[in-house]
Image (cartoon, rainbow, N blue to C red):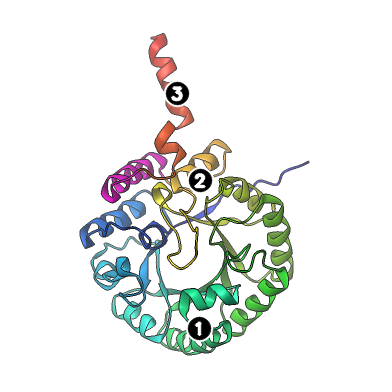
């Protein structure tokens, strides 16, 4: 079987938001700022710096306003935040964020567990969010959570993804992520779904967002690459998980994804060593081991370097 590898992948670091939102240890504003600035300094082009949601719902994100105001902004880096309603958009704009993200579940059950509203109710609210953002010069992207499977409803039919994509596009949103919220996707499903959605909606800039709950995230990424998707999310040290989805564990580790891409000769423009150092620091801050193969075993090149040193 012939493989179609892209020359470059566009990478988004979601650790400051998705990575931290399910952690018991609350990081300080200074630690979050250091995490975001460290990723930008390493060459990450897109960073999800947090979410503007009710602090009682997600306590880890209560200080996103302060974090967003304090970060040093590098030119060319996109800093985006997740929002749930118009108030979230207002808070984002007030803190200097110019790109907001709206998430809609492909599963009615997950939508109600996550946002306490139906899909139809959420979409109605998104109209106000999108209009306000666009009126104030902010860009809007979207995400389809539980796109490949739901812990309440099982496999999600592609027709549901088509329906939700059309709703997003009616709002003028043409950048969308298909998110494997609880790590239920498999490579064949990812390839078939991503290929179909790319062909049906060629005007959409697609992202893929994988969790490594069952150890298939990197395999799913390879399937996505072969389907022509070049934009991916990942989280430093493999942190992450949705607080409202049973069994949702960490995102695929940024350093694992970047290491694999480097070994495959696919360019990202990101300094892997700096990301590994940042992931180690983050692991110390949260105070527990995380799901990161590169943090456990090191890079392939580390073995070669040690072998060469012994020869000398």
- Helix, strand or loop at label 2? It is helix
Distance of mark 3 from mark 1, alpha carbons?
A: 51 Å
Q: Is residue 117 visible?
A: yes
Closest to the observer: 203 or 33? 33
Closest to the observer: 113 or 68? 113
Residue range (magenta) = 271-288
For discs 3 and 1, the disc positioned in front in the rendered view: 1
* Rendered location of residue 70, percent (x, y): 23, 66
| Up-down relation of residue 183 to residue 263 (above or below) | below
For disc 1, the marked residue is: 117
For disc 2, the marked residue is: 257
| Up-down relation of residue 271 to residue 140 (above or below) | above
* Rendered location of residue 200, percent (x, y): 73, 70
For disc 3, the marked residue is: 303
Q: Residues within 10 Å of mark 2 (few under 14, many from 20)?
A: many
Residue farthest right in this picture: 1
Classify residue 230 by image quadrant.
bottom right
Q: Are marks 3 and 1 in contact (CB under 8 Å)?
A: no
Q: Are marks 2 and 3 in contact (CB under 8 Å)?
A: no
Q: Is residue 176 left or right of residue 240?
A: right
What's the residue at 50%, 48% (across, down)?
Answer: 268
Quarter of the image for the N terminus: give it: top right
- Helix, strand or loop at label 1? It is loop
Was residue 36 drawn as part of the magenta stretch in this picture? no
What's the residue at 21%, 59% (across, down)?
Answer: 30
| Up-down relation of residue 45 to residue 159 (above or below) | above
């Amino acid at each position: 079987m012939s493989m179609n590898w892209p020359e470059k992948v566009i990478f988004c670091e979601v650790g400051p938001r998705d990575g931290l939102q399910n952690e018991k240890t609350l990081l300080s504003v200074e630690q979050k700022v250091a995490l975001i600035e460290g990723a930008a300094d390493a060459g990450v082009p897109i960073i999800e710096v947090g979410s503007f949601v009710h602090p009682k719902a997600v306590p880890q994100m209560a200080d996103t306003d302060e974090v967003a105001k304090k970060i040093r902004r590098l030119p060319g880096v996109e800093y985006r935040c997740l929002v749930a309603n118009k108030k979230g958009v207002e808070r984002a704009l007030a803190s200097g964020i110019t790109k907001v993200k709206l998430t809609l579940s492909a599963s009615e059950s997950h939508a109600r567990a996550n946002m306490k509203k139906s899909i139809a109710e959420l979409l109605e609210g998104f109209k106000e969010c999108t209009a306000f953002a666009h009126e104030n010069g902010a860009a809007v992207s979207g995400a389809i959570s539980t796109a490949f499977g739901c812990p309440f409803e099982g496999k999600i039919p592609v027709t549901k993804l088509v329906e939700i994509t059309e709703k997003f596009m009616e709002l003028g949103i043409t950048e969308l992520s298909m998110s494997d919220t609880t790590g239920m996707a498999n490579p064949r499903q990812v390839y078939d779904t991503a290929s179909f959605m790319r062909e049906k909606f060629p005007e959409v800039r697609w992202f893929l967002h994988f969790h490594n709950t069952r150890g298939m995230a990197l395999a799913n990424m390879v399937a996505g690459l072969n389907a022509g998707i070049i934009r991916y999310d990942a989280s430093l040290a493999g942190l992450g998980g949705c607080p409202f989805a049973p069994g949702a564990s960490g995102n695929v580790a940024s350093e694992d994804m970047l290491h694999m891409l480097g070994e495959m000769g696919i360019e990202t423009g990101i300094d892997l060593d700096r990301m590994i150092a940042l992931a180690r620091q983050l692991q110390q801050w949260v105070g527990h081991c995380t799901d990161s193969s590169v943090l456990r075993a090191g890079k392939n090149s580390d073995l070669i370097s040690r072998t060469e040193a012994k020869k000398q």
